[in-house]
Amino acid sequence: MYFSSTIETWFDLLLYLFTGYTGLYSIFGILEIIGLFLMFKKSGVKSFWAFIPFARAYQLAKCADREEEGRILTVSTFLLFLINFLGDYIESPIMALIVYFAVLALVTIVLIYEIRIYAGLVEVYKTTKLWIVAWLALGGPVAIYWGLSKKLVPSMKVEDLKKDAIDMASGRHIINKMDNGLAVGIQERTVMEFFHKKYLLRDINFYIKPGRMVLLLGGSGAGKTTLLNAIIGYEKAKADVILNGTNVYEKYRKMIYEVGFVPQQNLIRGKDTIEHTLLDTAKLRLPSNVNAKERRDRVNEVMEIFGLTPSKTHFVDKLSGGQKRRLSIAMELLSNPSLFILDEPDSGLDGVMARELMTQLRSVADQGKIVIVITHTPDRVIDLFDDVIVLAKDSHRTGRLAFFGEIDEARSFFGKDSMEKIVQSINSTSVGGEGRADEFVLKYATEQNKEVANG
């Protein structure tokens, strides 16, 4: 008895996996696979996806130009399947009640997102909205009809849905092997997500001269931290990053000492003094041929730059927020890097302390170093910066270069009198912005292409 019930359970499982339905409705599931096979061929999607459980729902969403909805639907249907499969093993009444409400919530989500995807199909196929009801009620037979019908043809294929002006925009600088400064030429930075390659960054090209303090500007999710990680080689992209004539990716072990990176969090031990923290860091960051006196001299020099000398015997956990940030920066400056990158160094600091910290970074840049800074309050210290990199998240949710140049040029380019207004102009309307990211990415790429063409 147990053996036969187990065989039946696994048969139902396989049937569900390959059709999406059980019992009397399995024939609808088989028809849906055949219909989607034909529809995918029409829409420019590889037809084999029709046979892949859960993934086919995501691919159908791509055909409807509703990729985001497809992700949510795929996850929700997988969770429903998992609950359905494990439901017979739940004996606790409380767990059963929790599962019951979870199923109700997931079924609601699935219904909502199926409607959105079917509405997208109706738009792409340019047909009546009554088909949404038909898809919900019948599924398989409708998929067969859509797949076979010569009248129902998608107005655009999946690859065409992504090919528009912004997708093709590319402001290409010629990245030469510079003897001085930082040349960045990122073709793309990608990850695999939901069965396809997702672009985090694309076509980002610029050159920064030594002695420049550069603001990295962009809305939330534009890829600022991703860009910094790509520049320093922590998360490698398909790119050329040349620092003072040397490729950072090719000579990573050597160049890691030429780059100072200060993250948002303070990574320092609280039970050490400032001086001991810096001396220990100097042993790690300075070359082995540097003797103890030279290390101490360098520590004293850095403490003086950041105003830490009077507090050098204080324990780290007794320091103020501003002192901890200065110590974190001082630790990275010990090795005398050519490129100095800081991710929100003024986070949590008041206006006076933030200004003081940024002034100290300005003095570092004035020593001939390149300093790149992310800050969420740029206008209070904008006079200290030379240039600005503006990243924008385009309509495909990819980080793109919307501008690189001097501060006054940026104000003119965007037609705004402040950095915060520039960010607002490229931010999505869903977060209170103007939604003009594509416009400025395209405008900047066009201008740069003209410069390259004119030599």
Image (spheres, rainbow, N blue to C red):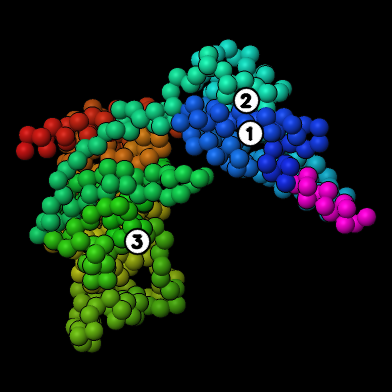
> Which of the marked residues, 1 or 3, is nearer the chain's N terminus?
1
Pointer 2 and pointer 3: residues touching (CB < 8 Å)?
no
The residue that disc 3 covers is 234
Answer with left or right where residue 252 lies relative to residue 47: left
> Circle 3 sits in a helix, a strand or a loop, which is it?
loop
Percent x, y of residue 115:
62, 25
Task: In the rendered view, tell whether residue 362 sits above or below residue 455.
Answer: below
Instruction: Residue lying at the far right in this picture: please name it.
Output: 1
| On-image quarter of the N terminus | bottom right
Q: As shown in the figure, which amino acid type bears the numbered disc 1?
A: Ile
Q: Which residue is mark 1?
A: 33
Residue 144 lies in quadrant: top right
* Magenta-highlighted residues: 1-13
Disc 2 target residue: 143
Q: Residue at x 69, y 33 (%)?
A: 30
Q: CA distance from mark 2 to mark 1?
A: 8 Å
